[in-house]
Image (cartoon, rainbow, N blue to C red):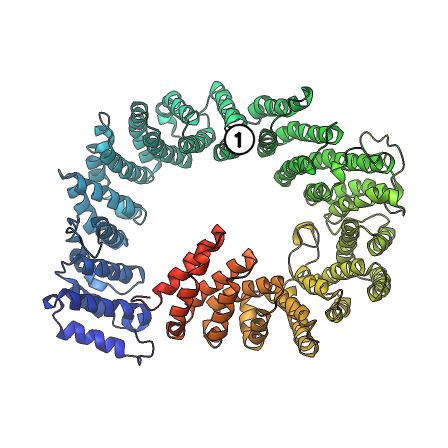
Amino acid sequence: MCEVLAPGLAVSVLKAIFQEVHVQSLLQLDRHTVYSIITNFMGTREEELKGLGTDFTFGFIQVMDGEKDPRNLLVAFQIVRDLIVKNYALGPFVEELFEVTSCYFPIDFTPPPNDPHGIQREDLILSLRAVLASTPQFAEFLLPLLIEKMDSDLQSAKLDSLQTLTACCAIYGQKELQEFLPSLWSSLRREPISDCRHHLCEPDMKLVWPSAKLLQAAAGASLRTCHRITCNVVPLLLEQYTKHPQSSQRRTILEMLLGFLELQKKWGHVEEDESAVLALRAPVCSVVFSAMTDPSVHLQLVGIRALTVLGSLQGFLSPSDLELVVDHLLRLILHEEDSQSSEAAMEAAGSLAPIYPQIFSGRMVPRLGEELQSEWEEEGCRAPRALQQRCLQALAAVSTHTSIVKETVPILLQHLRQVQKGSEARNAQDVVSVCQSLHRVALQCQQDAESCWYYHQKVVPCLLAMAVQAAMQESTHPLLSKALLEEEALAAMVPVISAASTHLIPELAAQSVSHVVPLFLDGEVSFLPQNSFPCSFQPFEGGERLEAQRRLVALLMAFVCSLPRNVVIPQQERLLRELLALSCSCNCPFTATTAAKCFAGLVNKHPAGQQLDEILQLAVNRMEPGLAEGPHRTQALTLLLWVTKALVLRYHPLSSHLTDKLLGLLGDAELGPVAADGFSLLMADSPDVLHKGCHADVRIMFRQRFFTDNVPKLVQGFHGAGPDVKANYLKGLSHVLNHLPKPVLVTELPTLLSLLLEALSCSDRVVQLSTLSCLQPLLLEAPQIMSLHVDTLVTKFLSLASSPAMAVRIAALRCAHALTSLPTTVLLPYKARVIRALAKPLDDKKRLVRKEAVAARGEWFLLGSPGR
């Protein structure tokens, strides 16, 4: 195990053992020592050992030949497997290596009573199987052996042979199996799938499973073979299913059946065999439908998977079968209390709907709509929220075809109107639920131009109309329901409008933007449905009574910031000025932030030139006095952050000036902490604006460029800052480093590591968490550098593992776990201390913390063990 052995010594040691030591004449412990020496050298001196070529393989064969002790065999089998999977040279010794291991097959071992070593027969079986199935080079020797053992009278030998064959089929190809398929088929036909007609007990189930897997492997060889085997085996499986009522056994049989159905899907159909396959339709459907009505959730889930495959087989399901399919899926969606089955049924419906759009739009969609509508028709009989949620999710799931989208979207929008008009107090969560379903539909429509345009012109005006209606009611009748105006609801509407707009072709986008921008600038509501409003829409006007209208700038942002860059925004300069004014003067943080984001999104896409320079200068002129003093300093800082991000992404020259402004604010007692967190905003991907999905101008490697330009300034500022604001610089630095590509960070690590370690002592939990997240991958990717600071790292991580914040405790424990990737010799002096300290979080009140503590402590326990 010594890591500083001189090159060549490992080879010398092994040559001496191979040439001078008759290993099998030694005591068990000494033989185990020889195996350990070989194992350790294979782990640390792989290239040297490979330099021996086939001499190493032959030498080990001599060492192992005749080994009988199960403790030693476990190690020896692992060495043989490593020889193969790590590509050591086997040369002419493939058969010898096979013989020296296969002589133990099948394993016949019964552990002695009170065995202190705890080695079980299953351990040896699995270890030997991993060797035998590790290379196709063993196929010509192993397959005849397994065929022979499959005809044995011993059930254990049959079982081991079948399971080993199953493992081999995952490695061997058609080339290796082809020669032996007739003999395999002959043996398998005599084996348990047909025998189990009469009795299916637990041992037989263990045999049936590998038999079926082998048949599936054989069926995968060719189209003709697939059909021949499927037509022979599927009736047997159907019979087994009918005869055995236990859910666990039925689940196993149905999983086998599913494997053959998937092969049928892969190969398609052969015309002359089509009648034989279709003859299975009625019994197969009967079995699958019965599984979907079984009380066992696990059996239901396999049934749903099988149903999805059946539906994808061309011409397999009849019209009456399809009606039953929809009815069964509906029952699971609406009435199955287990969420797993309900969700699986929705996904199955989503997969089958584009194949059979008529049956789903005519049978499933109306029923889901009726369930949603029923809650409004009977006073006091509102559907449970869980059922309502499932209906909404199911409507979204099946919206995978244009004709279905045209049925589901009106139902979803009508439900949203009911939420808005409801007489009872409504939670914004109802709006969020509908918007989540609408968002999924929008994403599914993006790849089809017809669906995309239909969805956009149907949904976007409707959402805008409902929001404008709610905002005007708030202005004139403030006591009415305002669920649509809650931040949570508006935030849920943003991705719906954004997803509905990003994939529009330029001509249609231009048509839409010609309506939406005048709505916000001039109150032009004529294009909105149900456009009879009690007052005018003036979101950019002042006055407290119009605050609700100003909040709708979030929806304007969602639309205009998602359009392709080549779409001309009408009255763009005027719009930018209005957004700028609103972002700097609005007292509502939500409105000010969305205005700033909308301004930034437009600036990012604005063509370079005089107009852009003028609007940016205007923004600077508004921001600088706002940052200096007054009641809107936070709003000015928010605008600074978003405009800086917009310009950093596109490498605009003004971004450097604005970043310097931000760096200067880190020393401000009031705004410093907010400015520090702003560095995360600059570096992270934004979910709603300024990302590639909404066509923003995002240059490659902008993070690396920002790092190069600004991290030296952050470090300099930290050293010159007073003690009360140093944490702001550390926080900003940790945010930048945490979002930097790790290869770049590793190259800069030596100069920055001392500051990162200092950041761990900062009392700010955001700094702690960000720094820990940054350090964890570095422990894995730069162990030599990190080893120089192991004492500080151990102390800091163990201290933070007791933090009041759960997220910090989890991150610290993950770092303590990652420490074990450092060189063992560096860590061993700390082993006892760390194991003692990690005993405390084992009793943490939070399960996730306990889980991380167990993983970390286990790795530290194993530190320095042989073979590691």
Question: Residue 603, how many percent across, how many down?
Answer: 78, 57
Q: Nearer the viewer, residue 631 or 573?
A: 631
Residue 497, above or below 645: above
In the rendered image, the quadrant that contains the N terminus is bottom left
Instruction: State the residue at coordinates (20%, 49%).
Output: 121
In the rendered image, the quadrant that contains the C terminus is bottom left
- Residue 227 visible in this rendered orientation of the protein: no
Instruction: State the residue at coordinates (71%, 33%).
Output: 426
Q: Give the SS element for disc 1.
A: helix
Q: Is residue 318 left or right of residue 733?
A: left
Question: Residue 260, how many percent across, how many down?
Answer: 36, 34
Q: Nearer the viewer, residue 445 or 332?
A: 332
The quadrant in which residue 784 appears is bottom left
Mark 1, residue position = 349
Name the amino acid type tagged 1. Answer: Ala
Residue 123, above or below 9: above
- Residue 784 visible in this rendered orientation of the protein: yes
In the rendered picture of this protein, how many numbered marks are placed on residues?
A: 1
Question: Residue 371, how many percent across, how many down?
Answer: 61, 23
Q: Nearer the viewer, residue 299 or 427?
A: 427
Instruction: State the residue at coordinates (39%, 20%).
Output: 282
